[in-house]
Structures are given as C-alpha cells and as structure tokens.
Image: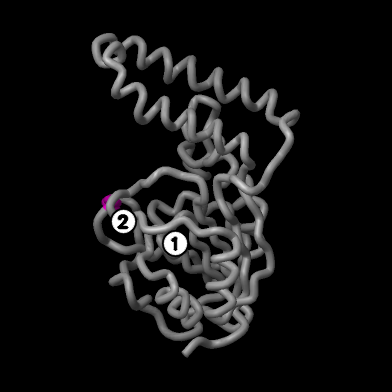
Amino acid sequence: MVPKNFNPSYKHPLYFIRKGLYRKISLYAPQLKGKLLDFGCGEKPYQSLFTNVGEYIGLDYNGEGHDHQNEGVDFYYDGKTIPFENESFDSVFTSEVFEHVFGLQDILPELNRVMKPGAQILLTCPFAWEEHEIPVDYARYTQFALNDMLEKNGFKVILIDKNGHFMSALHQLFVLYIHDHWMHRVPIFNKIPLFKKIVRQIGIPVMNMGFSLVEPFWPKSDRFYLNTIVIAKKIAKTN
C-alpha cells in the first residue's frame, strides 16, 4: 500500500505532483523485474507497486537535508561508491533523488556497474520545483540533459515521459506557495489559527478540485512541467 502522502487526496497541498508521480510510477513499475535496487529509497513509498520484483533492496545516503530515522533503509552508502558487487541487480528504481546528488555524472557509472547487462532503470526527477531538503538540492535536469548523461554512461534511453504540463505546474506551485509560505507570513494567520485551518481544510481542496474540473479544457504545453520520468537500459560497462 502506497502511503497517503504519496497517493494523496485533493486535501493535500502537493496533490498534483504527488498524484501524478503515483500514476506514472504505477504505469511503469511492472516493467521492472528480479532483484531491484531502490537508490535513495527513503521510506520506500512505492515498493508495493513493483509487483514483478523478487527482492527489493533500499539504499540511501545518511547526510544533511533528510532524516532517515525509522524509514527502514536497508543499506547506506558514502555518496561515492555503491556497496554491492558488479552486476548485482536486475532493476534499479530512483525517484526524486538525482537532484540531491552532487556530481551526478560520477554516480551514474556506479549504478551502471551494479546493474546486470540489459537491466532497466526507472527514474523520476523534478523539473519545476522549489529548493527542498536544503542544503543538498543541487540541480534541475531537462529531458535532454538526462538523456545525454545516461547515454554517455552506458545506458540506452527507452522512454521519456513527463508529469504535468504548463498550467498544472503553475497551479501546483501556487498551492505550494499558499500552504508553505503565504500562511506563515501573513499576520492574520499567525494571530487567528482558525484561518489556517480553513485554508487547509477547505481552501486547498476547493482549489485542487476546481482546477481538476477545468484542466481538461486548458491547451496543453509540455515545455514546463513538474517531473521527468525516464526508463533506460544498461547496454555497456563503464570505465
């Protein structure tokens, strides 16, 4: 079962980005099989979606920006070397992690090393999003940058997909601003807590439901969006 925070209702301030990611990962997860490495696993929120995986191993980095206490991480790594033998995994999954890796071009060869020939990697990265898990938020990658870096490190990109579009990204960022910033800086919310409760319990659900009703009628533009989703296959060993 995917936790509610990662498969949220309209009440959640991150409804559009989280619900969209849940749908995309649900769509592609069954393609991954065998022994899987969840790179940057956190609490492994999407583990239940990988129905064709025989073994699910979570790896994370124990550093600044994120507290891994009580998350059930199986192994930790030092940010440089993944602690597994060559060709250990049939699949790799990593979601919303690459932006926190300083020097992504240095870790991609490590991921390639621990993957078996022909193994697939499913990854997601934010595109339009605020800084988070500060101070370890280093980058935003376009689809072209991801494609280039993967192909230079022994992978063949099979699919690139996107979560959201121009207007849904703007709406999600607006709701995030209301919830995380505006409510904490407008004096009336600090003096009258009832206003915060009204915004959280009524305002945000109404905004999200309202946008969901009109979203199908908006002209779509995919040049500004919330997340990039990539499936790639290992085709070569890296030096």
Of residues 191 and 44, the one nearer the viewer is 191
Amino acid type, residue under disc 2 in the picture: Val
Q: Which mark, residue 140?
A: none
Category of crowding for the residue at label 2, using alpha-carbon neighbours closer than 10 angstroms: few (below 14), some (14–19), many (at least 20) = some
Marked residue nearer the N-terminal end (2 or 1): 1
Q: Quadrant of residue 210?
A: top right
Q: CA distance from mark 2 to mark 1?
A: 11 Å
Report the number of discs.
Answer: 2
Residue 65 in percent (x, y) is at 28, 52
Q: From the top left corner, tell me how far across and down residue 5 is, in percent.
A: 46, 38
Give the residue drawn at x 63%, y 80%. 118
For the rendered model, the colour scheme is one colour
The amino acid pointed to by label 1 is Phe
Residue 15: percent from the left, percent from the top?
53, 34
Q: What residue is pinned by disc 1? A: 98
193 is higher (above) or lower (below) than 68: above
Q: Secondary structure at mark 2?
A: loop
Q: Is residue 212 above or below residue 121?
A: above
Against 169, residue 12 (above or below) is above
Apparent side of residue 92 relative to residue 178 in the rendered image (left or right) = right
Indicate yes or no whether the magenta region holds residue 15.
no
The residue located at (54%, 61%) in the rendering is: 123
Q: Residue 179: x percent and y percent? A: 40, 27
- For image coordinates 50% across by 51% down, the residue present is 126
What label sits on residue 136 in the rendered view? 2
**Res 42 → quadrant:** bottom left
Q: Nearer the viewer, residue 205 or 70?
A: 205
Start and end of the magenta stretch? Answer: 65-69
SS at mark 1 in the image: helix
Q: Local crowd at mark 1 within 10 Å, few (<14), some, or many (≥20)? A: many
Magenta: main secondary structure equals loop
